[in-house]
Amino acid sequence: MAKELEKKAKEAFFDDDFALAVDLYSQAIELDPNDAHLFADRAQAHIKLNAFTEAISDANKAIHLNPSLSKAYLRKGTACMKLEEYHTAKVALQCGAAFAQDDSRFANLIQECDRCIAEESSGLSSTLSSNGSVTSVPSGNVSHLSNTNDGVAKEVEADSLVSQINEVALNRPKYRHEYYQKPEEVVVTIFAKGISAKDVVVDFGEQILSVTIDVPGQDAYHFQPRLFGKIIPNNCRVEVLSTKIEIRLAKAEDINWASLEYSKDILPTKINKPIVQSERPAYPSSKPRTRDWDKLEAQVKKEEKEEKLDGDAGLNKLFRDIYQNADEDMRRAMSKSFLESNGTVLSTDWKEVGSKKVEGSPPDGMELKKWE
């Protein structure tokens, strides 16, 4: 049955009935959700309908099911280019070219991406040509419409209003979402209760967010906005909680997002970040010249270390330096030998003095006596 629907969908596509092709491919996918070719072909139909975010979502699904399917990368690259996502498009096209080295379309589109990236980086605006056309209405027809019976006009207006109301009801999103932003990220929250993480697929592009919630037995939910600003896909995170899905988008630029979705009529504004003081704080002083006390302290310590003393002072400094630089056993040996020998022996070998009492050893010509 899925193959028959796929055949009919291809026929509709060749007849330029792209909406019917999408509908038939969707029916086929319901019967065979693991066929990567169905998703890749539906992506192509979406591109013809200018539904580029939906095309990217289908291409990502096809790549997930079959990572070597070259046409899926081609569909993704084409849709990303239509959205001016040139960096993301180039990566997808390069991956697809590895699986279809003889297909010149990849090389041509990669060259186009490089050209657009160069123009974008130099501040030039670049847009892709579209196949749409505008048809003017002859003045005679306008005159004819102005003479339409008032009753018929009201009836048509009423039917149109009912149609619009029904369309709004059908297009109402299944889950509510909202967002807030920080200087470095935008946090998107989708309020969906009791959703399992395995039923949620989130993809990130250079300026695209694609969210699909596909719970078995329910209609799939798709949220695929083109974002207000660019993001860093590798730094974005997703967390599925019991009552909501939290998506953290890492900003690629220091700009304030006026909305979640892109709008060509709204210009971004830079975020004024506070300047962090990197220098050491100066200590208060009544003198006109401030003094760096940290530098002065380091200089005094250096002079003390290099100071050369004579006699007992020099000897005491030597012993003090030895004690300060010694490990725990050496310090214990020095303390024990000095105390037990009444200041006549100073040993740094704990193995030698640790297990016995250290006897005094007066200098030659002197006698050791105890105080009574």
Image (tube, helix red, strand yellow):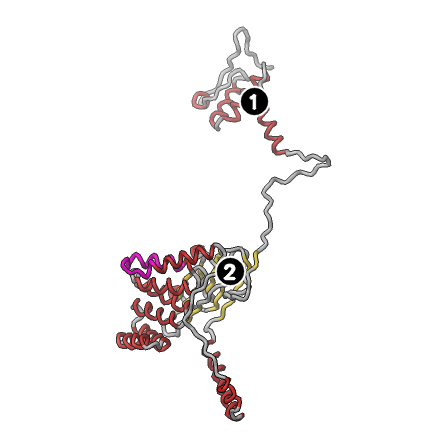
Estimate the x, y position of residue 194 in percent, counting from the top left: 43, 68
> In the image, 366: left or right of 205?
right
Residue 241, image x, y percentages? 45, 63
Residue type highlighted by circle 1:
Glu
- Mark 2: secondary structure: strand
Task: Check residue 28 for magenta coloring.
Answer: no
**Residue at 48% from the left image edge and 78% from the top image edge:** 168
Q: Quadrant of the C terminus?
A: top right
Is 57 located above or below residue 151 in the figure?
Answer: above
Query: Compared to 329, does 117 lie above or below?
Result: below
The N terminus sits in image quarter? bottom left
Question: Which secondary structure lies at badge 1?
Answer: helix
Dot 2: within a 10 Å radius of its alpha carbon, few (fewer than 14), some, or many (20 or more) residues? many
Q: Is residue 101 magenta?
A: yes
Alpha carbons under labels 2 and 1: distance apart:
57 Å
State the extent of the magenta-drawn residues as a range.
88-107
In depth, the one of 101 and 229 nearer the eye is 101
Percent coordinates x, y for residue 325 in the rendering: 51, 26
| Quadrant in the rendering for residue 109 | bottom left
**Which label belongs to residue 186?**
2
Q: Please name the residue that numbered disc 1 is placed on.
A: 306
Q: Nearer the viewer, mark 2 or mark 1?
A: 2
Asked if disc 2 and disc 1 are in contact, CB closer than 8 Å, the reply is no
> Toward the viewer: 86 or 226?
86
Identify which residue, 222 or 14, lies in the foreground. Answer: 14
Crowding at dot 1, Cα within 10 Å, few <14 / some 14-19 / many 20+, comes out as: few
- Magenta segment main secondary structure: helix
As drawn, the label of residue 13 is none
Q: Tell me where residue 257 sits by quadrant.
A: bottom right
Q: Residue at x 26, y 74 (%)?
A: 3
